[in-house]
Image (cartoon, helix red, strand yellow):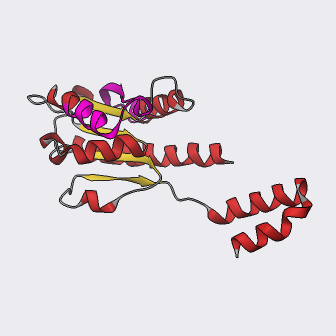
């Protein structure tokens, strides 16, 4: 069920991305002649479970609308870095774009989103940025940015409660009372 929600969420994100790119497209020459440079920043390494689906979804969204894009996927691999290293890595990445910034930055997951925004790199203030897959959005860090938007994953506490109740009632009937007390 979680996988279905994740895929549905990413489809919604792709639709939003397309809408944003079409908005950018209106400000430029004929879309069949324009190559858009898109930077996609992933929180994890290139082998994470849903990474292939994310890449395919992004590619499909752009190609469905006949948009010519050059996409660079950057894998931050947050599991191997501390917060300062993440920010430094992203700052160095964005320094590569000083004279030719991407048309859009797409960020996937909490760690990369937080580190990119808190890097306070000049490019983060001028390039449209769309985040997705963020579970714990710290809205305070968005202050002063009017170029950042995205999708926050809503946690379904009721579904988690029902699942926990089902598991505990089924496997551990003696734990029913403890679960009821913990939830209430």
Q: Quadrant of the C terminus?
A: bottom right
Q: Residue furthest bottom?
A: 184
Of residue 40 and residue 114, the one placed in the foreground of this image is 114
Task: Locate residue 140: give its quadrant.
Answer: bottom left
From where the camera sits, is residue 22 visible? no
Query: Does residue 147 lie above or below 57 as drawn?
Result: below
Q: Which residues are magenta?
A: 62-91
Query: Does residue 137 lie above or below 9 as drawn?
Result: below
Give coordinates of residue 105: x percent, y percent: 28, 38
Give coordinates of residue 179: x percent, y percent: 77, 66
Q: Is residue 157 left or right of residue 118?
A: right
In magenta stretch: residue 94: no
- At a point 15% along the width and 40% down the height, the residue shown is 123
Give coordinates of residue 171: x percent, y percent: 89, 53
Of residue 51 and residue 59, the one placed in the foreground of this image is 51
The mark tally for this picture is 0
Of residue 165 and residue 147, the one placed in the foreground of this image is 165
- At a point 60% along the width and 49% down the height, the residue shown is 5
- At a point 37% along the width and 46% down the height, the residue shown is 131
- At a point 8% along the width and 28% down the height, the residue shown is 99
Q: Is residue 31 left or right of residue 13?
A: left
Task: Locate residue 74: give its quadrant.
Answer: top left
From where the camera sits, is residue 149 visible? yes
In magenta stretch: residue 85: yes
Q: Is residue 170 left or right of residue 123?
A: right
Give coordinates of residue 101: x percent, y percent: 16, 33
């Amino acid at each position: 069920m979680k996988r279905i929600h994740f895929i549905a969420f990413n489809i919604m994100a792709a639709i939003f991305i397309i809408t944003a790119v079409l908005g950018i497209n209106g400000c430029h020459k004929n879309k069949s002649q324009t190559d858009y440079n898109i930077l996609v920043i992933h929180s994890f390494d290139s082998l994470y479970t849903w990474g292939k689906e994310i890449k395919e979804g992004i590619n499909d969204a752009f190609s469905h609308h006949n948009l010519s894009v050059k996409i660079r996927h950057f894998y931050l691999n947050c599991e191997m870095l501390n917060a300062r290293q993440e920010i430094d890595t992203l700052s160095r990445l964005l320094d590569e774009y000083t004279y030719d910034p991407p048309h859009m930055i797409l960020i996937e997951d909490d760690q990369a989103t937080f580190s990119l925004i808190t890097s306070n790199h000049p490019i983060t203030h001028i390039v449209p940025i769309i985040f997705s897959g963020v579970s714990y959005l710290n809205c305070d860090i968005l202050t002063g940015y009017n170029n950042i938007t995205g999708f926050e994953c809503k946690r379904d506490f009721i579904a988690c409660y029902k699942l926990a109740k089902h598991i505990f009632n089924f496997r551990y009937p003696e734990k029913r009372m403890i679960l009821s007390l913990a939830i209430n």
